[in-house]
Amino acid sequence: RETYTSKHELMTNVRAWRKMDRPRKRGWIWATSTATFNLLCIVVAYHVIQNVILSKHTVKLGQDVQNDWITTRKTLSFQVCGGVANHRLSLLYGVILAHELGRAAIVPEFPVIQTNGDNEPRMVPMGQLYDVPFFIDSLRVMGVDVIVPEVGIQKNSYTRVDITAMEDIVDQLAESHKETEHLSVGCLVPKLHETYFINSNYRIMWAALDAIRPSDELMQQSKAMAKSLSALTDAKSFNFLHLRMEDDFAHFCQQLVSQASPLQHYCSTTTDQLLQMLNNLNVPRDQPLYVAAAWHRMQHEAADGVLKALESVGYNVHTAASFKDIVTSAGEEKAVVEFELAMQAGKMIGHGLSNFSSLAIVQRRNAGLWAAHYNGGPLPLGSTLPVDQLPWVFAYNTDSPNLDYLVRAAVRSALRYRVLRPICIWTSNVTTGSPIYDWMVSYDVQIVQHRPAWTNTLWDKLAAWSKTQSSKPKQSFLMRPSSLLRELVSVDLPQVPELEQYSYVLYTSPAIFFYNRVSLMGMPQPLPEVLTMVADPSLSNKLDSGVMLMHLPGLRESYREFMGYLTNNKQGSGEPSFMLGAHGVFTQFYKQNLLQDLLPLQYAAKPYAAYDSTALIVHFEGPRPHDYMHFFYWMECAWGNSCEQAFKRGLCSYMHKWHSMLNETEDDIGLGIWYGCNTLYAPHLRDKLCMRYHV
């Protein structure tokens, strides 16, 4: 600016410089490209020559090359315990432990119960039950080394370590046996803490479970059974039911009762309850139903009674006895065949307290397949492994793009602990061109477009009622059909096909975030028979419906009666019942059930209340984060003194974690509140702020 008298003169000289410098730039580009090409040629030539030389020695070295590599690598040998379900868990735990220790896992032997009546198991190679090459190759892709025991290492080379008294196996083995070449440990189930299956090991966990595939012989038996069952119906499909009604399981249930275990409520299941649940889950009767169980451990009368009861209500029942010409295996081998059959079924139903059922359920759901358990309650397997994801359901649409940041923070917080499955009920007709819709797809949120059958009925009823009123209704959700649907869609969750397989779902407002780990096992037991909300004495109605735990089978049982209440007028009034909103109709219709088991306040902590470090969910009830920002800048709040109380109490403590769930390139609200909180709690800045606002 000081040299040139005008902008035009400046730009003229700049263009002239660019023209003079262009050949020089091209020369540099040409020289760099030539050097890069020459270097590439040298590298390629080197590798070609190296491969030619090594190929001459391949036959000579053969297995010796692999032996030399293996004997220079530290390894981990581990035992497998229990039946087929524990086979899979033992393999998973062993692989994760070896990976954490930086060792190669040795393929173990497997215990198999003798078919001659001897209860003492015999050890067989893994290849007799499972496809070993497939298992090794699948984990190698994930960066995990697994090697067969016959190669390179003698059994007497292992250092046996007792892990029974160890609290943290990974840390203690890494510290005390850092220099040990070949470690050997006992059965690891369930010795590893859940934290070792989260973060980077989460993908390895699923890869290991999916890689446990039957051996070729057993796979052929399973496929032949699936083909025969599918051929029995025009639908070319069959369903799978795994029962737990053996004598030893009945004794196990009695132990849970004597121990006052919370799982006692979900153990014993009568035949009538089983039939009722199969009907509730819409298991089709026109398709074959394969029933698996440890029949030899059940009394003949009990086994025969269950099968006859299933047939009496129209199910086409089949067991392993129907395929004696196909299934030539017994014991664990037969169980491996049936586990694979469960993975091939159209619908799979099992008992949640059985590891066999639980593993089949979680693996099917992870693969996007339908799976359920007929006994209700949580899957205890989820307390040791992050595999049982509680469905977290929320409704959203395109009506409020200014609130998209709330959805982004909520989804990121849900995915943080790997134990929640985000499901969005999308109530808008528009999907293309919606930034938040595309964002949720990119984060693997399951988006369900569901339009209840009663939508038009309610809208017509509202329109007719509005004509009789002198003023418009105050409820904002009554202004447009999409808003009405978003408000009331929670009452129709029992009828959403995509949710049919789940016993419990956690339904929340999108204006929440998960502050700590939330799981079904950690909730107050027994779980509600219909639904429950959060008890909050600070609210006028004492209940916070922004967080609800819903038992879908229980809601289905009363759905028809509930719909009658929803579509009729309120008692003694001409006003439609649904104008109460989801909170109103739920609390009115299910008031007897709601008073039994309410969720504690940790499931809906408020920023304007005192900070609770044990809070599980933070609910932005009333003021949203952008309202707090507005108050911080302008000292204005539409919710009375709630905004001021929030800054004095819990808001800033919760913001420490919440703002990290937002990307400041997308949302500046989280960062703004965080800066505001830092200002309030930094003494030299806080004093200036107080002087400015005379507080």
Image: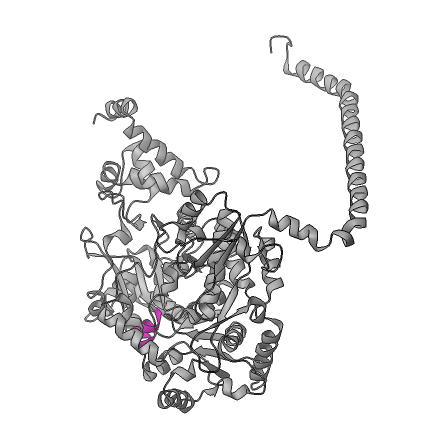
Q: Does residue 435 show up?
A: no
Asked if residue 197 lies in the magenta stretch, the reply is: no
Q: Position of residue 47 (x, y in %)?
A: 77, 42
Q: Quadrant of residue 424?
A: bottom left
Q: Is residue 556 magenta?
A: yes
Which of the pair 9/293 is nearer the observer?
293
Where does residue 51 sit, x and y in percent of width and height?
78, 46
**Residue 415 on image: x %, y %:** 43, 52
Segment tinted magenta in the rendering: 552-564
The secondary structure that most of the magenta stretch takes on is helix
Q: Is residue 157 above or below residue 590?
A: above
Q: Quadrant of residue 324?
A: bottom right
From this viewpoint, which residue is outermost toward the top? 3
19 displayed left or right of 505: right
Which residue sits at x=41%, y=88%?
Answer: 307
Image quarter of the C terminus: top left
Name the residue at 29% across, 36% down: 631
Q: How many numbered marks have been drawn onto this rendered protein structure?
A: 0
Q: Residue at x 51, y 59 (%)?
A: 206
Is 220 left or right of 614, judged from the image as shown? right
Considering every residue shown, the one lying at the far front of the view is 156
Q: In front: 612, or 161?
A: 161
Image point (31%, 82%), residue name: 270
Q: Quadrant of the N terminus?
A: top right
| Left or right: 445, with 42 as reference point | left
